[in-house]
Amino acid sequence: MRAALVALMLVAAGPADAATGCVLPNVEVKLLTGSITTRDLAAMSDGDLKTFLRGYADGLRTLPFLSVPAACDEAVKACLKARTDDERVVDLRRFIADNPGDFENPATVTAYEVVLADCVHGEAE
């Protein structure tokens, strides 16, 4: 299942002392695009696409930990709630069919376009 090669890795290091309260660790975030392209997405089964898109959505749920403004986090949450996994797979297949020149784009760029761009920024993006 190549779709499981999700491109978000969080590495947390630092002290956390529960006895003295909550101490937030130092967090280093590395976004790795890997070698998954839109062409690879097009070749995946619907089940693999669903897994890939769920991983993408799970990564977006880390936004509050990355000091993203609350308004942006709320907009992303609304986008994620607005569509089911199956609807996102249909949206992704439609996007790929409508944009055949984007096959070499990183899969994360295509996932952003399908999951968030219109929802957060409107149709103009």
Image: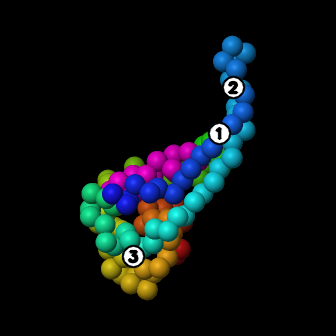
Q: Nearer the viewer, residue 73 or 93?
A: 93
Residue drawn at 54 percent across, 53 percent down: 8
The residue drawn where x is 33% and y is 57% is: 1
User: Which residue, given by chain and number where applicable, does mark 3 sit on?
Assistant: 39
Judge the density around disc 3: few (<14), some (14-19), many (≥20) Cα neighbours within 10 Å: some
Q: Residue furthest top?
A: 19
Q: What kind of element bears circle 3?
A: helix
Q: Which residue is mark 2?
A: 16
Q: Identify the element where label 2 is drawn.
A: loop
Q: Give the labeled residue for mark 1.
A: 12
Give the residue type that dot 2 points to. Ala
Q: Are marks 2 and 3 in contact (CB under 8 Å)?
A: no
Q: CA distance from mark 2 to mark 3?
A: 43 Å
For the point 51% across and 57% down, which residue is it?
7
**Which image quadrant is residue 99 in?**
bottom left
Instruction: Give the vertical position of 66 relative to 1 (above or below).
Output: above
Residue displayed at 53% across by 74% down: 125
Magenta span: 50-63
Marks 2 and 3, the one that precedes in the sequence = 2
Q: Amino acid at mark 1?
A: Ala
Q: Residues within 10 Å of mark 1 (few under 14, many from 20)?
A: few
The residues bearing labels 3 and 1 have C-alpha atoms spaced at a distance of 32 Å
The stretch drawn in magenta includes residue 11: no
Residue 56 x %, y %: 46, 55
- Between the residue at mark 2 and the residue at mark 1, the CA separation in whole angstroms equals 11 Å
Q: Is residue 83 visible?
A: no
Residue 104 in view in this figure: yes
Instruction: Tell me the SS state at disc 1.
Output: strand
Q: Badges 3 and 1: C-beta atoms under 8 Å apart?
A: no
**Viewer-side residue, 93 vs 5:** 5
Image coordinates for residue 11, horizontal then vertical, percent: 63, 43
The kind of residue on which mark 3 rests is Arg
